[in-house]
Amino acid sequence: MTDLLRDWLPRQRWFGGKGRPITEVTETASALLQDADPVVRLAVVHVAYADGDAEDYQLLLGSTKEAVDQRLEHSVIGDVNGALLYDAVHDPVATGVLLEHLAAGDRVDGLTFTNDVPIDPTLPPRVLGGEQSNTSVVYGDTVILKLFRRLQPGANPDIEVTKALADAGSTHVAQPLAWVDGTVEGETTTLGLLQPFLRHSAEGWAMATASVRDLFAEGDLHADEVGGDFAAESERLGLATGEVHQLMAQTLPSAVAGPEESRQTAQQLHERLDAALAVVPELAAHAAGLRAVYDQIADRTEPVPVQRVHGDYHLGQVLRTQEGWVLLDFEGEPARPLQERRALMSPLRDVAGMLRSFDYAAQHLLAENPDQRHLAYRAAEWAERNREAFCDGYARAVGADPRDEAALLRAFELDKAVYEVVYEARNRPTWLDIPLGSIARLVGARA
């Protein structure tokens, strides 16, 4: 089985080790959820790379000696001892078994299923597509279970932060309803989280990119003149973000960082840049400008408020419901170490992440359709309008304008763009110019 997984894992969208030679795959934990045909189990596999690094991943595996349904053929991993092994997140029987265990609050082979509210175990499941780093299953358009694919031992920030905010009365998060914990490298680790499914909602990314399409369709109009202008929603999103940050600071640990912490932050930014330069040579042309911005942070003497933050904030992490904006996925950037994702940081990191996302929403259509490059000035206008609107709303919520911390905000936005450069180089090379262009603009703005 592990030999099959060595070939199968790199082809999965959520697998973070693409382009890295795998030396070994080892199954380190397995919980038998159903012993009938199909056999269903939840497994943790340890993936070792040729460079000496390693990662842990969660798999929901099905095994059957019967022919798989045509709808499951794409999920087949291979033949193991005369039985077909497949990725069972696509099998309603297997995902239904998961819900049954959550509803019962079971303990199975080292797994602990916990629920805070009654769960209907008969809800029909369907897996969602298009996710980058996890896999989610919707049950009856009522609840949604997120299975964390890449695992790091310890408490997952998503359930930790979301539960704290929900318990404090926030209307801008989806309340945790149930979860499953296992053990990874000897530590209790959250494997899955069940929350309400906000079916009458729209994803922020979809709304923003629809606005950009409307603008491009009316090439002779400005961003504030088209019917799909998004700026009002961007301001409301900034307001919701600020309110969440305020509540996080009140309900979770917070502090004030001094000059030594600022120097450590700058060192971290330099180290991330060093790692990115080893992967993406095109970044070298901007290295000096990036380091000059980071050095401004190292020289900072003013205090910086720090707290728990979202950590991977962008338009794909927010939903617009009838009641307002809801923030999702507080686990941080999955590629970052867990200790780093749970650390206290400036909330401006989240602001910077959303500002980057507005640039992406404006630019991605140009990246996919080179014949529209003549509309680049309209894309830049749309991004700037919505970035400003978001900051206006945020400033109203927290009583301080993030633009007043221009050096810090610029450094965090550049750090996020450096992260994006590596991601695009590995996954979407045709989009590489988006973060590279933003880096050039932000470094030039400093000059």
Image: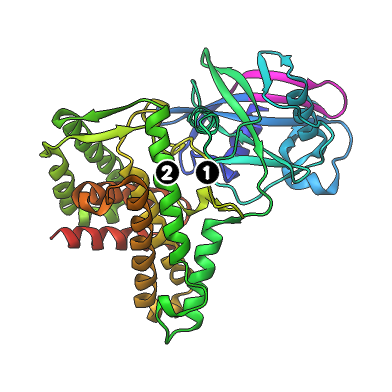
Identify the residue shown where x is 38% and y is 38%.
Answer: 246
- The foreground one among 211 and 79 is 211
Please determine whether, in this image, residue 447 is positioned above or below residue 195: below
Please determine whether, in this image, residue 80 is positioned above or below residue 197: above
- The foreground one among 387 and 172 is 172
Whether residue 311 can be seen here: no
Query: Callout 1: helix, strand or loop?
Result: loop
Q: Quadrant of residue 300?
A: top left
- The foreground one among 352 and 89 is 352
> Quadrant of the image for the C terminus?
bottom left
* Disc 1 target residue: 172
Residues at discs 1 and 2 in contact (Cβ within 8 Å): yes
The answer to whether residue 244 is left or right of residue 413 is right
Q: Residues within 10 Å of mark 2 (few under 14, many from 20)?
A: some
* Disc 2 target residue: 243
Residue 340 percent location from the top left of the image: 36, 29
Identify the residue shown where x is 45% and y is 54%.
Answer: 237
Query: Callout 2: helix, strand or loop?
Result: helix
Dominant SS type (magenta): strand
> Quadrant of the image for the N terminus?
top right
Q: Quadrant of residue 256?
A: top left
Q: Quadrant of residue 263?
A: top left
Whether residue 270 can be seen here: yes
The kind of residue on which mark 2 rests is: Glu
Residue 331 percent location from the top left of the image: 48, 35
Residues drawn in magenta: 26-43
Residue 323 percent location from the top left of the image: 59, 52
The kind of residue on which mark 1 rests is: His
